[in-house]
Every structure is written in structure tokens, then in C-alpha cells.
Image (cartoon, grey):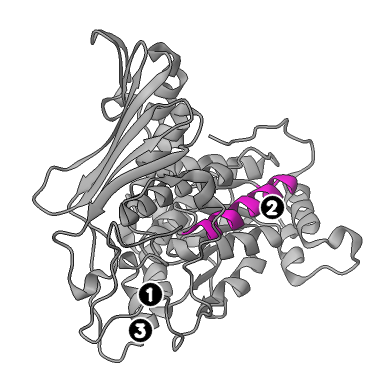
Amino acid sequence: MSKTQQTPNTSSRREFVKNSTLIAGGLLTAPLLSRANFFSGADATIKVALVGCGGRGTGAVLQALQSKQNVKLVAMADAFKDNIDNCYTSITSPDAFDSAEALARVKKAIDVPEERKFAGFDGYLKAIPLADVVILCTPPGFRPIHFEEAIKQGKHVFMEKPVAVDPAGIQKVLATAAIAKQKKLNVVVGLQRHYQNSYRELFKRKELIGDIIAAQAWWNNDGVWVRPRKAGQTEMEYQMRNWYYFNWLCGDHITEQHIHNLDVVNWFKGTYPVSAQGMGGRQVRKGKDHGEIFDHHYVEFTYADGSILNSQCRHIPGTMSKVDELLVGTKGKIFCGTGKITDSKGNALFQFDYKTENNPYQTEHDELFAAIAKSQFRFSDAENGAKSTMTSILGRMATYSGQVIEWEKAINSGIDIMPKSFAWDAPPPVLPNTEGFYPVAVPGITKYF
């Protein structure tokens, strides 16, 4: 995990937040403070803007507001106004809380009048200046753009995984991650297993199994929602609503979900694959509303030391469900799903006590906001987030093409699958044929190099 821990400085939180903003905006040499800079340093409250108000954004902002720090939500942005309204309703609803006390506390921490709810593709540009911390939870295709803007404006960031959908986006995130480090801006990525007690305890003891020589990773289940086309939608709106099925927005489920498992293996290995080859396709999920993504992938990732990660992810109802990771070492095995470490003969070396398990989604926000409140620079997750995302993209390129894909060639390919412009009447990168079906990759025919 790329996480930097430095000696806490002795300045106050207000100075820390204010100075981060000043450095980022180049304002230490400029006499004028913008409204945003004034807003950030005006009091001890940590101000938050939410960019991306769908399901994950709703959950993430609730977790931020339920941290122990003095956090206030001051702005919300989304491409769709109804997403903002639904999110606002959810986070102020009694149904979201265990007690009236918790509801009252969170309601008190929400200060988002209508004039600070920003709809449209450019909503993030209006929300980010108002905050100290930005929560980025849009579909992942937008993440590199929004992350770049947040760091440019000197904001601490929580952003969901994956952090890009193509090599060009990965390069942008890596460049922005380096700037964030220079500015000492905390960045946490929602690869929450890094914040989960069971995984942390297993990681501490990974030397028990010797050198990791093989691994397996699974994300197999029934799949996710579908949002059918509605009358009157432009093609751009339809794809934005049904975003899971278009690579420029989602990256395919190997990137959007299976990244968690691939990231765990990278984390324990301490490195990233050098190549990938695999197979995949769509057997069940192949209707007009299923866009262009596959419903199954099986990838063999190779690391520089010759070790292999066999990964599989599948979205097919009625098949075996399994989300887990297994690490095989020269002296034993780590079973992540059961929190167990054994020697090569199966004798138990460690068993995690699940009575001490935590909610990692809450912990990642607790630790981020605690660091900011203490004026500490502790988190720089973006580089690892980008490289684990690239691992999943490498796998997608391998299954789509049926070829061996080399990491260095892929990450430096400049492949960019994002639209040239963002507007409701602009053409998305992929369009349906006259029968309403989208082009789908064909192994052996689809080529990248």
C-alpha cells in the first residue's frame, strides 16, 4: 500500500488546511484570497463537497459525516439533479440511521441549500472550491478529471475505486498523485480492504508463508442492476444512466469490482504484474441494455519474479458465488476470506478473531478525517489505486484481444476511450447499430497494438 506516514507538524488544523489550499492555488505569492480559500480557513469545521451522488456517493458521504471529527457537507454535484435530490433525501432520512441521536447529529452537519447543489457535467467545478475535502464517487471514467481538479485546488480527497478506465486516465492519476504528495494533501482510495482489520492482521503476518509464488482471486456473483433506455433520452443520457455497461464510464466489471481482489494480491506481493493473458466473453448478459462489456473474464497475470495470479470474475446468475483471495507461499498459505494462515501441511499458524472485525468503509473515513483534524499528512493512496486499476485494465485488454499484453506497453500506449466533449447532445465513444446493439470486443480480432 502506498501510504506515507510523516511526523505530524505542529501547526494547527486551520493552518494546515489553509496552507494546503494556498500552496495548491499558488496563492502564497499572490495577495488575493478567493472565496474558496477564505471559506476553507475560516473556522475549525472540515468542509466537504460530494461529487457523484449515486449509491456509493450517498454511502461515502454518510460515512464522512459519521466520523468523529467536525465535518460539514457544504456542496453536492452530479450530472443529474435527481441524483442530487435523491441523495439529499437519503442522507436526511431516519431510515439511514440506527437512532434519532445519530440522525440529528448528521442533519446538523449538512448545510447544502439549493444554490450549492450543482447539476451538469461542470458541477464539480463549482462544488470543489467550497470544500476542504472532496469526495469523488461518479462513474470511474470521470475520476482522473475530477481528481486533477481537486488537487489543483489544494483539496484533500477521498475517491472511490477504480480511479480510471484507460491507460491515458491512469497516467493522469499518477501525475496528479505526485503533485498531491508534493502538496501534502491526503488522498484515500476506496480499496477498503486496506482499512479492514482482518486484512491488516493477515498482512502483518504474511512473512509466515515465505515468498508468495502463486495466488488466486475471485469475484463471481449474479451481477448488478440494469437501467433500460427511456423515451426522450439522448444517447449520452442513456449511457450515463446505464453507466455500468459502457467501458468509458465503468471499465467493465473486471475493473469496477474485481479490482478489489487484484489489489489485495498486488498489496501482499508488494508489486504489480508485468503481463497478462486470458479469455472471456458474454454468454448471458448480451441484450441491448448490456452495452459492450463481458459477463466473464479469466486472466493469468504474471509478475516479474515469475509468480502467477489466476483471476476470475463472472456476472452470471445461477452460478457459483465467490469473492475471495488466496495467497500461496513457499512455506504456507493465506486464506483471506476466512482470515487464516496455514503452513504447507495445513497446520494453522494464525486465525483472525472476527469479533474484532470492523466496518472498513467507516474506518477509511475515520482515519482520513482524523489525520486532517490533527494536521497530519498520512495518506497517499492514489499511486497504488492507479496501478491496481491498471492491473484490471491490463486484464481487460488481455481478455478482449486474446493476446499477451505487456504492462509497460499498455500503460504507455496513450489509449484514451473517453469522449471528446461532455454534453447531453454530444456523441459518446461507442454507438449502437441500427438494431440497437453495441460493438463488443472479439478475441483474436480486437487488437490494441
Look at the image and tell me whether residue 77 can be seen: yes
Nearest the camera: 4 or 22?
4
Residue 124 is left or right of residue 261, and the answer is right
Question: 59 above or below 264?
Answer: below
For residue 240, which numbered disc appears in the image? Answer: 1
The location of residue 383, given as percent across then percent down, is: 58, 44
10 Å crowding of disc 2: few (<14), some (14-19), many (20+): some
The location of residue 168, given as percent across then percent down, is: 55, 60
Classify mark 3: helix, strand or loop: helix
- Look at the image and give the residue range highlighted in magenta: 166-185
For residue 44, which numbered disc appears in the image? Answer: 2
Query: Please, what is the three-letter code of the amino acid marked with disc 1?
Result: Met
Q: Which residue is drawn at 35% across and 64% down?
A: 93
The answer to whether residue 170 is magenta is: yes
Residue 283 is left or right of residue 329, and the answer is left
Query: Please, what is the three-letter code of the amino acid marked with disc 3?
Result: Glu
Question: 1 above or below 65?
Answer: above
Query: Please, what is the three-letter code of the amino acid marked with disc 2?
Result: Ala
Q: Residue at x 76, y 43 (%)?
A: 12
Nearer to us of marks 1 and 3 is 3
Nearest the camera: 410 or 373?
410
Residue at the outermost bottom position: 232
The residue that mark 3 highlights is 235
10 Å crowding of disc 3: few (<14), some (14-19), many (20+): some
